[in-house]
Image (spheres, grey):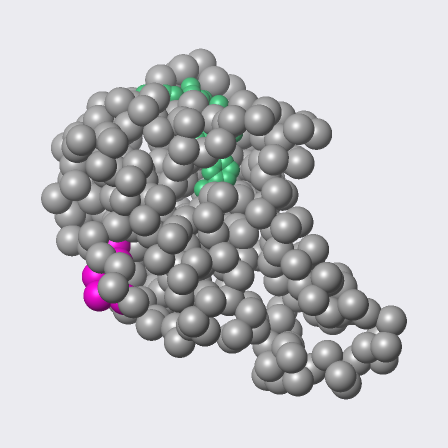
């Protein structure tokens, strides 16, 4: 008997197909269903993935219509228009909102018990819209949020400080986009707060700390623009981020990841989706962690929330 889970992926573009590939290699799903309005593209990816199956754990990888969502544990939505060079994530909002109005009811008709993971940009707005369209409880609708940005952040800190990224704890929170913010006040390396770690570093004398930290964050914020300029889309790191989110839910791991969730009562912010570290388990989002932010970070967080709320108001949902 195989009781491994089933994952449905809506959108067989760069992100959906790379996620399917990474998920297949991880070997944690019994079945991966790929759905796209371009059925031929979905079919092509499934064939290509299946041709590598002799090198991974057995997984059923199939293309389908929305009926393929039946029995899915998690439905990952990556369908929609993507950022063009120079375009912001929020520019995409109207196009992708219309697409979601079609997709979400289809998904619910066949997978009413699933957890919905939104990836399409602008991810915070679309997570909120998915929550409203679906009427599902807040724990069962989440966005990939700043999991990717946080991974970029940890990588860049680790590179600068010459330490394994897995020993860096630091979060990017707020919008997955231009108003996101770094939580330097809670950043640590090997359990030591970063401002205390720096003087212990052998490069301390040669390092202009303020400039370095600002450079790291600027680099995080501009990463997607740079990758899109270079090769048209970002997909490897988001593919791995999605595997991490999905495996912590499926394994009931209670790992803390900064996914996009509906915020209520946090520094005066409410009724908007954005990222804060959340504990994830088999029920989806089990808790969001109320980080203690510095006064400056609180201000930036509120600004990030306000800019998202403004977009939601303009959409007149
Ligand atoms: P892509 O253009 O390669 O793929 C999008 C796919 O969606 C296409 O295959 C298209 O046919 C399909 N599609 C469009 N409308 C559809 C519909 N109504 N029903 C079913 N399928 C439909 O784009 P991509 O590079 O895979 O990016 C997908 C989305 O993910 C974009 O919005 C992008 O901005 C976003 N993204 C998010 C993150 C993140 O961290 N949240 C990271 C990278 C990309």
Q: Is residue 306 above or below residue 44?
A: below
Task: In this rendered view, identify the residue nearer to me: 278 or 7.
Answer: 278
x and y, in percent, of residue 256 in the image:
42, 68
x and y, in percent, of residue 152 in the image:
61, 54
Residue 116 in magenta?
Answer: no
Who's the residue at 49% across and 57% down the image? 181
Task: In this rendered view, identify the residue nearer to me: 189 or 26.
Answer: 189
Secondary structure character of the magenta stretch overall: loop
The answer to whether residue 243 is seen in the rendering is: no
Who's the residue at 44% across and 14% down the image? 40
x and y, in percent, of residue 71 in the image:
23, 42
Who's the residue at 66% across and 84% down the image? 196
User: Horizontal placement of 235 versus 131: left or right?
Assistant: right
Asked where in the image residue 203 lies, by quadrant, the reply is bottom right
| On-image quarter of the C terminus | top left
Task: In this rendered view, identify the residue nearer to me: 316 or 254.
Answer: 316
Asked where in the image residue 35 lies, by quadrant, the reply is top left
Q: How many marks?
A: 0
Q: Is residue 180 above or below residue 223?
A: below
The answer to whether residue 180 is seen in the rendering is: yes
Magenta segment range? Answer: 262-266
Q: Is residue 70 above or below residue 251?
A: above
x and y, in percent, of residue 222 in the image:
61, 43
Who's the residue at 40% across and 76% down the image? 292
| On-image quarter of the N terminus | bottom left
Q: Quadrant of ligand 1?
A: top left
User: Horizontal placement of 52 versus 304: left or right?
Assistant: right
Task: In this rendered view, identify the residue nearer to me: 64 or 275.
Answer: 275
């Amino acid at each position: 008997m195989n009781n491994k889970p089933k994952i449905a992926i809506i959108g067989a573009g760069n992100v959906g197909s790379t996620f399917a590939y990474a998920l297949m290699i991880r070997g944690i799903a019994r079945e991966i269903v790929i759905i796209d309005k371009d059925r031929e593209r979905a079919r092509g990816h499934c064939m290509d993935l299946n041709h590598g199956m002799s090198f991974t754990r057995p997984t059923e990888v199939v293309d389908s219509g929305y009926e393929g969502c039946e029995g899915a544990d998690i439905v990952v939505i990556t369908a929609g228009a993507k950022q063009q060079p120079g375009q912001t994530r929020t520019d995409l909002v109207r196009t992708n909102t219309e697409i979601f109005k079609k997709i979400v009811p289809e998904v619910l008709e066949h997978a009413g018990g699933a957890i919905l993971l939104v990836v399409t940009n602008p991810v915070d707005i679309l997570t909120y819209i998915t929550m409203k369209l679906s009427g599902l409880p807040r724990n069962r609708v989440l966005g990939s949020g700043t999991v990717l940005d946080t991974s970029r952040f940890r990588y860049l800190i680790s590179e600068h400080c010459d330490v394994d990224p897995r020993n860096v704890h630091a979060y990017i929170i707020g919008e997955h986009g231009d108003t996101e913010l770094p939580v330097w006040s809670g950043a640590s390396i090997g359990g030591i707060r970063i401002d205390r770690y720096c003087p212990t570093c052998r490069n301390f004398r040669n390092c202009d700390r303020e400039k370095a930290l600002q450079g790291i964050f600027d680099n995080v914020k501009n990463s997607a623009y740079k990758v899109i300029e270079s090769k048209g889309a970002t997909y490897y790191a988001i593919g791995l981020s999605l595997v991490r989110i999905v495996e912590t839910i499926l394994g009931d791991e209670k790992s803390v990841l900064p996914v996009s969730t509906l915020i209520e009562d946090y520094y005066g912010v409410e009724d908007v989706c954005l990222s804060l570290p959340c504990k994830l388990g088999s029920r989806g989002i089990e808790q969001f962690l109320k980080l203690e932010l510095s006064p400056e970070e609180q201000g930036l967080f509120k600004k990030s929330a306000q800019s998202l709320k403004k977009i939601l108001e303009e959409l007149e949902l």
